[in-house]
Amino acid sequence: MMTQQRIIASYLFFCVALSECPIVAADDAVINTVDENTRISSSILITKESYRQITSKFPTVFLKLFSPKCSHCQTLAPDWEVMAQQCMSLHEGILVGEIDCSTNDPIQNKWCDQNFHLSGLPTLLYGDPSVEGMHLKEYAGDRSISALTRFCKKIAEGGPNCSPSNLPACDEETRSAYEMYWTWSEERMDKVIIEEEANLASLEEQYDAKFRELHDAYNAAALEF
């Protein structure tokens, strides 16, 4: 619950500070305005600079974070393209895109790591693209064309995601929480974020200490046999 509060408060802080909480609408016109140099068939190539402009037009995205040099990424690429073409041709409310996280631009690569918490490539993310991907979730299912297309169709037909910019899509508890946080001042938001980050740091220290304790106990028991 504390983590949820930290995330919500952080989200609202960015909304207030940047005035970036629009209710987005499905609009495929953005695809037609993307420069041809950034178009990869039906899957749109997105960069740090273009992320907000492109994704703000869509309530839902399905993104591939990749490296052109990665063998697994190369294997996935043709199936991803087929899926993107099929999904986006049938559903206007979803954007299928991809982000190169191994460019020669260190700022781009750092942005990938910090915003999307990469554990490896390729990584597939989906959901509400607002606030630089804070609310995106990782897709961990099968990566065949049929499975990817079914999943893309599922999230496209599932309707807009719950967020402060789309309260009707939220359950009552989450909606009430968002409405409560909207009443907070920026100073109070900052205070909550700092407190929750301190709580998380404390829990991580406790975890590390317990892990070391168990590790030492295991090694000691192993020496007795």
Image (spheres, rainbow, N blue to C red):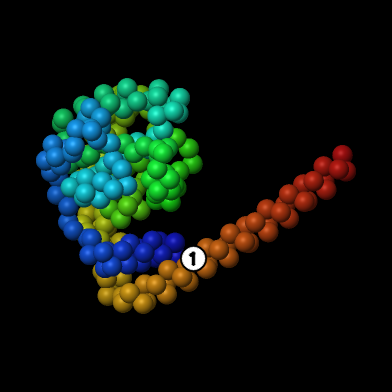
User: In the rendered view, would you say 210 is above or below 41?
Assistant: below
User: In the rendered view, would you say 135 is above or below 34?
Assistant: below
Q: Residue furthest front?
A: 104
SS under mark 1: helix
Q: Is residue 84 visible?
A: no
Q: Give the quadrant of the C terminus.
A: top right
Q: What residue sits 41% from the left and 64% below the top?
A: 6
Q: Which residue is mark 1?
A: 197
Q: Horizontal and vertical percent for residue 53? A: 21, 49
Q: Horizontal and vertical percent for residue 158? A: 23, 42
Q: Residues within 10 Å of mark 1 (few under 14, many from 20)?
A: some
93 vs 167, nearest the viewer: 93
Q: Give the quadrant of the N terminus.
A: bottom left
- When asked about the image quadrant of residue 18, the answer is bottom left
Q: Horizontal and vertical percent for residue 97? A: 28, 37
User: In the rendered view, would you say 109 is above or below 186?
Assistant: above
Q: Horizontal and vertical percent for residue 102? A: 42, 37
- When asked about the image quadrant of residue 42, the answer is top left
Q: What residue sits 21% from the left and 57% below the top?
A: 166
Q: What residue sits 41% from the left and 33% below the top?
A: 67
Q: Is residue 103 visible?
A: yes
User: Which residue type does callout 1 highlight?
Assistant: Glu
